[in-house]
Amino acid sequence: MRNSSRQAPYEGEISGYAKETVAATQNAGIIKRTGDGKLAPKNNATKRH
């Protein structure tokens, strides 16, 4: 998969093996960054309709 993420690369935020999956899930709208542009994998998830 080509790295087409809006916020890539993820240097220092996630492990190398997860970059492709994180980019894909972010591009699909499944995960989003926080208001300050960071990934927060340990934060609680929210469900919005």
Image (cartoon, rainbow, N blue to C red):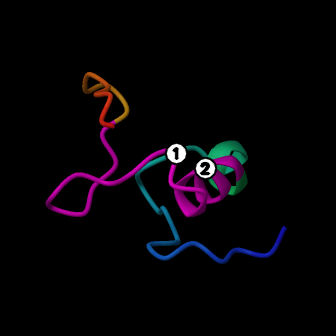
Q: Which residue is mark 2?
A: 25
State the residue at coordinates (65%, 77%): 4
Task: List the single residue furthest toward the front.
Answer: 49
Q: Image quadrant for the C terminus? A: top left
Q: Which image quadrant is residue 46 in?
A: top left
Distance CA(mark 2)–CA(mark 1): 5 Å
Q: Is residue 23 left or right of residue 17?
A: left
Q: Is residue 46 left or right of residue 28?
A: left
In contact (CB < 8 Å): disc 2 and disc 1: yes
Q: Which residue is mark 1?
A: 30
Q: How many numbered badges does the structure rendering display?
A: 2
The relative height of residue 39 versus residue 28 in the rendered view (above or below) is above
The relative height of residue 15 versus residue 7 in the rendered view (above or below) is above
Residue span colored magenta:
21-40
In the depicted view, which residue is nearer to us: 16 or 1?
A: 1
- At label 2, the amino acid type is Thr
State the residue at coordinates (57%, 72%): 5
Please tell me whether mark 2 sits on a helix, a strand or a loop: helix
Q: Is residue 48 left or right of residue 20?
A: left
